[in-house]
């Protein structure tokens, strides 16, 4: 077989005699790694490809299972499965041993089991194995979310990390009784470049790794409320293993119900969460450090509420609830901006631990298909004068 024939044709044809795309990728990868030439690998009398050396630790972990695979879907939570016009789902953050394969140099692949903070995705609002869309024990990002533009997202988010599984870090960014978190005072900052802000700022900014088991979701690329139960990156959902998942889910589902009846559940929901935080503080009393942190989170929330602000810390659950609006087509009618289609993503945004959590896989795709509102097709887009101008700009 000539080289040019081997590299282009028949790859997509999955017949008995021809390698399918997945096999092709596998052989190509193995060939590259073992130094075999590709045409030999693809010939009908091909020898068994020489696989690179492996190291394995445990039977559930096998790097060979991952080599040559195309990108595998991490599972999907879809629009309209439970209710038309809604994406109803659940992301359960738990501690899980997951198989992770990686290249270790020298044509060697290693698979090891790692204890990770891991998203499990479910279609609907129950932790029901039949409705689970993600795989257990496999290193992967969170489920792909596929709402339509115009949908309302109703996503139960649970943080059921067992904090005993990881080394303790302070939960909150405020300086704890144990003094673990450094702060930088804006007015006294003496690093390179001097004060980072034009005017002296007396705020104390946290300047340490912290809150590795506290988390939230950021809806990157969405045109949603940046506060409340929308794209609120300032909330910290504490790990809570002292309340049943059923009870946490029920709180969120009650809130969704209220919103759907055009009522505002915020006050009742917040009061219940506040009571749950107090119970949590009692139940972790045998762990003085964790208990002190939960108490400091409660005190922090009280300060927030007194100042008319949103409570920062939540007891293991949060009902993400937001609309992905279709533009009204008019600049004077709500919504004056609409959600853009595209391949967006969601990810943890816990200040103090975002990178660590991302490296655990705490992110996923948010895929919004194109549904072009009629108004978008009727604007006079060809004329630059018809487009909004950026203040101060002459042209673009
Ligand atoms: Cu982002």
Image (tube, rainbow, N blue to C red):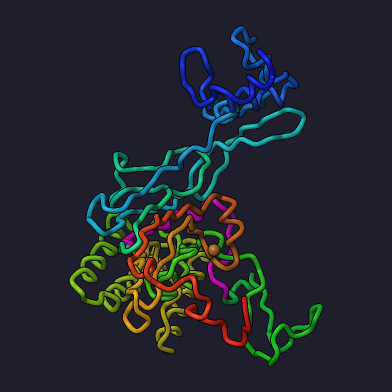
User: Picture coordinates of residue 181 (x, y %)?
Assistant: 64, 72
Q: Is residue 372 magenta?
A: no
Rendered residue at 65%/36% (across/down): 102
Residue span colored magenta? 153-173
User: Picture coordinates of residue 194 (x, y %)?
Assistant: 79, 84
* Residue 218 is at least partly visible in this image: no
* Residue 97 is at least partly visible in this image: yes
> Which quarter of the frame holds ligand 1?
bottom right
Rendering quarter of residue 36: top right
Q: Is residue 190 above or below residue 148?
A: below
Relative side of 278 to 260, left or right: right
Q: Is residue 136 above or below residue 168?
A: above
Rendering quarter of residue 222: bottom left
Q: 173 or 129: nearer the eye?
A: 129
Most distant residue in the top direction: 45
Relative side of 283 to 11, left or right: left
Q: Is residue 43 above or below residue 203?
A: above
Rendered residue at 43%/70% (across/down): 223
Which quarter of the rendered picture does the N terminus lie within?
top right
Which quarter of the rendered picture does the C terminus lie within?
bottom right
Relative side of 199 to 377, left or right: right
User: Picture coordinates of residue 341 (x, y %)?
Assistant: 43, 60
Q: 219 or 187: nearer the eye?
A: 219
Rendered residue at 53%/65% (across/down): 350
Rendered residue at 74%/83% (across/down): 189
Q: Is residue 234 above or below residue 187?
A: above
Q: Is residue 166 magenta?
A: yes
Most distant residue in the right direction: 192
């Amino acid at each position: 077989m000539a080289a040019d024939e081997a590299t282009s044709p028949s790859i997509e044809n999955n017949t008995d005699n021809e390698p399918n795309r997945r096999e092709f990728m596998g052989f190509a990868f193995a060939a590259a790694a073992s130094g075999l030439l590709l045409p030999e690998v693809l010939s009908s009398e091909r020898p068994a490809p020489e696989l690179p050396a492996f190291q394995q630790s445990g039977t559930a972990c096998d790097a060979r299972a991952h080599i040559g695979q195309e990108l595998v879907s991490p599972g999907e939570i879809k629009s309209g499965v439970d209710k038309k016009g809604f994406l109803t789902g659940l992301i359960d953050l738990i501690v899980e041993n997951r198989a992770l394969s990686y290249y270790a140099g020298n044509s060697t692949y290693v698979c090891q089991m790692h204890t990770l903070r891991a998203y499990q995705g479910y279609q609907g609002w129950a932790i029901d194995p039949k409705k689970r869309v993600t795989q257990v024990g496999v290193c992967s990002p969170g489920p792909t979310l596929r709402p339509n533009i115009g949908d309302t997202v109703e996503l139960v988010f649970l943080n059921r990390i067992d904090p005993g599984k990881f080394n303790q870090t302070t939960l909150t960014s405020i300086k704890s009784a144990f003094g673990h978190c450094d702060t930088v005072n804006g007015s006294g900052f003496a690093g390179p470049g001097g004060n980072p802000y034009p005017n002296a700022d007396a705020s104390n900014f946290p300047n340490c790794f912290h809150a590795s088991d506290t988390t939230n979701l950021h809806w990157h690329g969405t045109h949603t409320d940046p506060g409340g139960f929308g794209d609120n990156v300032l909330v910290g959902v504490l790990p809570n293993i002292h309340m049943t998942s059923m009870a946490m889910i029920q709180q969120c589902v009650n809130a969704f119900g209220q919103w759907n009846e055009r009522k505002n559940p915020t006050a009742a929901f917040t009061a219940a969460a506040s009571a749950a935080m107090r119970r949590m503080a009692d139940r972790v009393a045998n762990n003085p450090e964790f208990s002190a942190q939960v108490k400091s989170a409660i005190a922090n929330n009280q300060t927030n509420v007194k100042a008319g602000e949103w409570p920062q810390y939540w007891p293991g659950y949060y009902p993400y609830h937001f609309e992905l609006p279709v533009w009204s087509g008019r600049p004077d009618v709500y919504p004056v901006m609409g959600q853009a289609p595209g391949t967006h993503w969601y990810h943890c945004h816990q200040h103090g631990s975002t990178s660590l959590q991302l490296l655990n896989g705490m992110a996923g795709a948010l895929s919004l298909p194109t549904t072009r509102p009629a108004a978008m097709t009727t604007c006079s887009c060809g004329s630059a004068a018809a487009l909004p101008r950026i203040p101060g700009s002459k042209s673009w």
